Image (cartoon, rainbow, N blue to C red):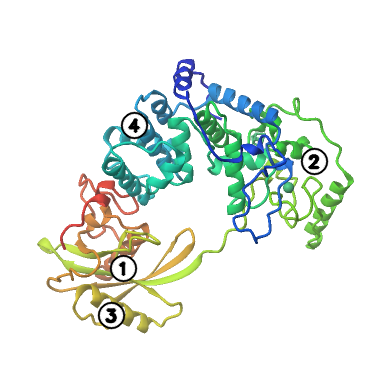
Amino acid sequence: MGSCRCSSAWQRVRRGLAAGPVVLQSGPAALLHPSPSLTPYRPPAAAPAPAPASPSSRHLFSDPAETEALRRDLLAWYDRCKRDLPWRTRAATEPSADRRAYAVWVSEVMLQQTQVATVIDYYNRWMQEVNELWAGLGYYSRGKRLQEAARKVVSELAGQMPRTAEDLQKLLPGVGRYTAAAIASISYGQATGVVDGNVIRVLCRLRCIGADSSSPAVIDRLWDMANALVDRSRPGDFNQALMELGATVCVPKAPLCGECPVKQHCRARLRASTTPESGLKGLPCVGQGGLVDEPALIPVPSLQVEKELASASQKLLGKATPVPDVEDCGAGGCPLCPPAAEPWDSSLGVTNFPRKAAKKQPRAARAATCVLERRGCHRAPEYLIVQRPSSGLLAGLWEFPSLPLPQDLQEEKQREALAEHLQAWIGQPVVAAELQLIGEVVHIFSHIHQTYVVYSLSLDGDVTLDAASPPSRWVTEEEFHVSAVSTAMKKVLKACEKQQEKRSNPGQGSKRKRGAKAQGTGSTGPGTQLSLRAFLQPPTAP
Ligand code: SF4
Ligand code: ZN
């Protein structure tokens, strides 16, 4: 865990800001105060659908006194130990609510899938210069959407940020449920919870939730829980504390349970301590604090022993003999317990939670692509790039003209199909036999295993692009690298250059890359990120 710093002046400012919270109008406050007329979770949308099974209180925060204690413990820890981050300071000191919300918004967008340490420098520079600093952070579309939404605030909302999570999500493009709730709770003090990857992990451990934590049903329940749990007077701090706990203490692989401020409320820790192997063998859940303030050890029931034996014999004999977990609510009925086929693994301790369903294998896809080259000014090579559709995979990015291919299409046929495709772009016949086969480039997207069959073709003379076609342009190599092209396309160009170099210098090692950039040109090299300005600039004339 990072250094623990106290900052009482800072806290005073924050407390002042947190005054006057907006209390969530609807939501699962019933979780905290169950009454016979209110069920803990949302009712099913359609009447004929069977009602989902309700989880037992084991998975809920149903004791108001415990909830209060948990809020208190977590906030006290946060006040003592929180990291000093620039967006927190800004959120606490900026007097204008709109600017405060904008500052939080930028930080939340930057933090999506990017580490805090990487974001700090970009954040500071962005807030100072508000321009082309997205380079290096990746996830281009985030930057673009942020700019679109900021424009909308200025042009359609008279410069005023929406004031509730609901309106933020409804009115600002690209602002999802999490970002809206983070902005509303941190900037405006709205008592609404947040759920991100860190919160999912912490809540699943606190309440032994072993059902697939990526399923919409479980995510919905976690949102209900976060809304119920959030501290009413310091919602922004509470949400940040919960996320901070996940980022620094309740980390994925080796949580520091001994140092955890809410360990006495943690059912996963209790669960781990009831298994003899776990607590006494120094599992991750037992930190420096040891077992001194552990909950009393509960005798291991005989069914548990039976389960361990069954699991051991399964390992030895390879036979699956699932035995219901005595610590779970009951075989099959509970929507939040682990599936019966995946019982508690005592060697994992608290890291049994959360669980995700196995990832689907990425889908295999093939495309033919052509590095089409012409001679531009001073005979320098220029390449044709075309823009992808504005939705779907790699939306709006630029690429070499490409054509999806069915699997197992013969080389001759794919060459013909590509020639026809290129003809449509450049408006003149392309002879299939003249396409040079470069080879295959593989790129793995999160859900697609994409193979590009790469060809190249050099055109003589000028080529006028069809103005009626979707956007396309000729770019020099330098321009290519600072354009909004995917990493896959950079690999394609690299492969093409390598091949051409081999052909022009047979027998020689590749010492110099054709078109290698001079120093100080200001452009980024292959594999590096794009400049935001390049992305937002209108395309240059063909
Ligand atoms: Fe996470 Fe351990 Fe704290 Fe439980 S006790 S919340 S598992 S760090
Ligand atoms: Zn259960």
SS assignment at label 2: loop
Crowd around label 2: few <14 · some 14–19 · many ≥20 (10 Å): many
Query: Of the residues tagged 4 and 3, which is closer to the observer?
Result: 4
Write down the residue under mark 1: 499
- Mark before the other along the chain sequence, 3 or 2: 2
Is residue 457 visible from the viewing direction of this image? Answer: yes
Query: Of the residues tagged 1 and 4, which is closer to the observer?
Result: 4
Cα distance between the residues tagged 1 and 4 = 52 Å
Give me the disc on residue 455: none
| Residue 387: x %, y % from top left | 28, 63
Amino acid marked by disc 4: Arg
Report the residue at 67% width, 29% height from top.
258
**369 vs 49, nearest the viewer:** 49
Write down the residue under mark 2: 275
Cα distance between the residues tagged 4 and 3 = 52 Å
| Residue 183: x %, y % from top left | 44, 36
Crowd around label 4: few <14 · some 14–19 · many ≥20 (10 Å): some
Query: Of the residues tagged 3 and 1, which is closer to the observer?
Result: 3
Cα distance between the residues tagged 1 and 2 = 60 Å
Relative height, residue 235 to residue 391 (above, below): above
Write down the residue under mark 4: 99
